[in-house]
Image (tube, rainbow, N blue to C red):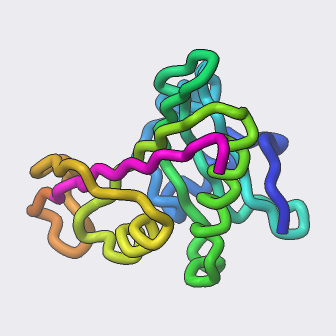
C-alpha cells in the first residue's frame, strides 16, 4: 500500500464512493474542499486503486506554527478493521512533522462512533469539547441527533 497526494479523477472517485466513505457533502462542497488553496488531501492506494482518503486543510500557518483540521478520513468498507485508518493518520502526522513546524491537529467524531474515538485516543488525540445535537439523523435512529466530540493533538516539530 502507498500514499498519493493526488489521483486521477479524485473528485469523481469521492463522489462515486460518497456513501461508502460516509461523506455527507454535496458535489459542490466536495469540489470546494478539494480545490481550496490551503487544502491538504491524500489517498491510500492498494495496487494503485484508491481505498481510503483524508481530506483536510490548514486553518493557520506561519513560519513556526500550523493548525490543521481533518475534515474527513475514511476507508472503503471492505478494507476496514485492518489498521488502515491508523495508517492514514500516522502518515498525516509524518507529513506535517516534516514541515519543521509545530502543528496542532483538530478533528471531530460523532459521539456514537466508538471505533473512531478509540483510535483517536490511542494516537494521543485529546477530547476538548462537545457539540450537542451537531449531526443530523443517523441510520440507526433516524429521528435522533448526534453529538460531536472535538479532538486536538499537538505535534512538536522536534519529536
Residue 56: image location, x then y, percent: 55, 39
Which residue is at 17% across, 56% downward? 147
Count of numbered labels shown in the rendering: 0
Q: Give 139 or 62, whichever is nearer the viewer.
A: 62
Q: Which residues are magenta?
A: 146-159
| Extreme residue in the front direction | 158
Q: Residue at x 90, y 68 (%)?
A: 47
Query: At 63% from the left edge and 32% from the top edge, which residue is drawn?
Result: 101
Classify the position of the N terminus by image quarter.
bottom right
Does residue 63 appear to the left or right of 27 in the view shown? Answer: right
On the image, the x and y values in percent for residue 16 come to 62, 52
Residue at far bottom of view: 81
Q: Above or below — where is 9 with respect to 36? A: below
Q: Is residue 139 magenta?
A: no
Residue 73 in the image, given as x and y percentages of width and height: 53, 55
Compared with 29, 52 (above or below) is below
Q: Residue at x 16, y 47 (%)?
A: 131
Q: Depth check: 118 or 45 in front?
A: 118
Q: Does 80 sit left or right of 87 as displayed?
A: left
Task: Work out whether residue 115 or residue 50 is closer to the camera in this orientation and state it.
Answer: 115
* Rendering coords of residue 107 (x, y %): 40, 48
Quarter-wise, where is residue 102 in the image?
top right
Which secondary structure class fits the magenta region best? strand
Q: Is residue 149 in the magenta section? A: yes
30 is higher (above) or lower (below) than 111? above
Foreground of the two, 71 or 119: 119
Amino acid at each position: 500500500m502507498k500514499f498519493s497526494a493526488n489521483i486521477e479523477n479524485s473528485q469523481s472517485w469521492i463522489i462515486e464512493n460518497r456513501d461508502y466513505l460516509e461523506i455527507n457533502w454535496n458535489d459542490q462542497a466536495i469540489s470546494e474542499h478539494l480545490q481550496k488553496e490551503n487544502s491538504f488531501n491524500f489517498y491510500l492506494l492498494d495496487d494503485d486503486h484508491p481505498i481510503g482518503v483524508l481530506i483536510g486543510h490548514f486553518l493557520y500557518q506561519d513560519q513556526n506554527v500550523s493548525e490543521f483540521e481533518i475534515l474527513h478520513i475514511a476507508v472503503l468498507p471492505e478494507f476496514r478493521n485492518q489498521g488502515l485508518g491508523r495508517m492514514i493518520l500516522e502518515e498525516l502526522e509524518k507529513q506535517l512533522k516534516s514541515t519543521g513546524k509545530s502543528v496542532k491537529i483538530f478533528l471531530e467524531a460523532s459521539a456514537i462512533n466508538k471505533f473512531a474515538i478509540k483510535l483517536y485516543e490511542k494516537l494521543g488525540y485529546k477530547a476538548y469539547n462537545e457539540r450537542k445535537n451537531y449531526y443530523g439523523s443517523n441510520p440507526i435512529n433516524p429521528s435522533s441527533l448526534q453529538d460531536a466530540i472535538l479532538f486536538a493533538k499537538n505535534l512538536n516539530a522536534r519529536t
